[in-house]
Image (cartoon, grey):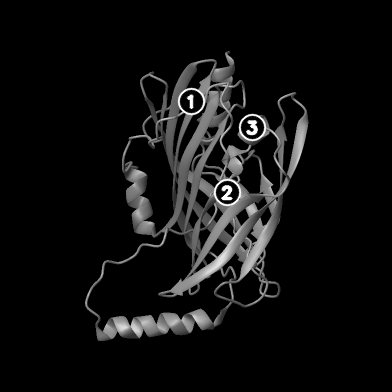
Amino acid sequence: MTRLESQKSAIIFCATFICSIAAAALAPTVQAAPQESTTGDSISSAVDRLAAKAKYEFKYDLKEKQELFWKVEHVTTTKTQIAGTTEEASARVETLSSWEVDDVNRTSGDMVFHNTITAIKSWKRVGEEEATLYDSRESKNAPDEYAGIASSLGQPRSRITIAPNGKVLDRQSDFVSTDFSTGDITIPLPTKKVSVGYRWNVPLEFESTNEFGAAVRLKARRCYQFEKVKQGNGYISFRTEVLTPIESEKTRSKILQKMVRGYIVWNFEKGLPIQKRTHWDEKVQGYDGADSFLKYVGRMSIKLVDSREHEEAEKELTYTSLKPLKIAPIKLRRSNERPELRR
């Protein structure tokens, strides 16, 4: 296997399966087109202004015997150049999963639920090869990277106990999860009532290597901010910050998938997140030779759906589009050019 093939496999195959079917959410804020002001708009605007001044409690409030359904979509495109050879790999995976709440402790509020994946559909293309498609409801022979999942569809993959603030207290599972650095299966929440603008951080540590193959540990953190309240939902933004100075592009190339950002929509009435969107858009140059280049673009959407939507999706998972994410043309500097300043 060439260095290019090895790098491509490490990125694309690691990124094509959705592991933590967490709750969560948000879509980017959409600005409405200008329109005439109405009494209803004025009232809604006033309510939103008052909501911004209030304090809110973010707390998981799952009910015993409750069943929650999730639809997840993960799309990635990676473009790699090493030793003058360029290759692009794209993948798209959709999964359906559910949480079945077994028990809720009335004293502590701790909740226990089973996480189950019910269906998976994947599309993948590497270079100029013909795209491959796998649908768990139609194909008996799953690709190697999905073999473990295919054999356990419809069966609880893990039994998880969480505290009201989203902290995972216990996890029992026979399966190994893939780390996409999108957070745990639940969201870390503030432990007190907070108002719009409140920020909190979760410490992280990443492992990488430098150009000599030596291990490098990087301190980082996931930063959250309570952005606004609208129509009963709290909007939370998040991003990853690396605190340890990164001294080489080789080290940076190993953590591109961990550099996430996105939004969460929290429903106060339901006591859980109803949507989460995560984005990646990272690149490195000169990580494996002066003319080497690696660009990683991706997005992940996790959405709470009702039982009817889940049943319909189980019959047919249909991609919005099978087109891969587009990557802008790559401009490589030559080995004798001075490096550009990084913004």
Give the vertical position of 33 relative to 305 (above or below): below
Disc 2 to disc 1, how far (Cα)? 24 Å
Horizontal and vertical percent for residue 39? Answer: 26, 86
- The local secondary structure at tag 1 comes to loop
Q: Position of residue 174 (x, y in %)?
A: 66, 40
Relative to 57, is 324 above or below?
above
User: Which of the two labelled residues, at mark 2 and mark 3, occupies the earlier sequence position?
Assistant: 2
Mark 3, Cα crowd under 10 Å, few <14 / some 14-19 / many 20+, is some
Residue 172 makes an appearance in the image:
yes
- Place of residue 254 in the rendered image (x, y in percent of width and height, measured from the top left): 64, 33
Q: Amino acid at mark 3?
A: Glu
Q: Are marks 3 and 1 in contact (CB under 8 Å)?
A: no
Q: CA distance from mark 3 to mark 1?
A: 32 Å
Question: Disc 2 designates what residue?
Answer: 182
Sequence-wise, the earlier of marks 2 and 1 is 1
Q: CA distance from mark 2 to mark 3?
A: 22 Å
SS for callout 2: loop
In this view, the residue in front, 131 or 111, is 131
**Residue 113: quarter of image:** bottom right
- Residue at the disc numbered 3: 249
Q: Which residue is mark 1?
A: 143
Residue 24 numbered tag: none
Nearest to viewer (mark 2 / mark 1): 2
**Dot 3: what SS?**
helix
Taking 293 as reference, is 71 left or right? left
Identity, as a three-letter code, of the amino acid under mark 1: Pro
Residue drawn 45% across the image and 27% down it: 89
- In-front residue for pair 338/51: 338
Q: What residue is drawn where x is 53% and y is 22%?
A: 334
Amino acid under label 2?
Answer: Thr
Residue 37 placed where, x, y %? 25, 80
The reply to whether discs 2 and 3 touch (Cβ–Cβ < 8 Å) is no
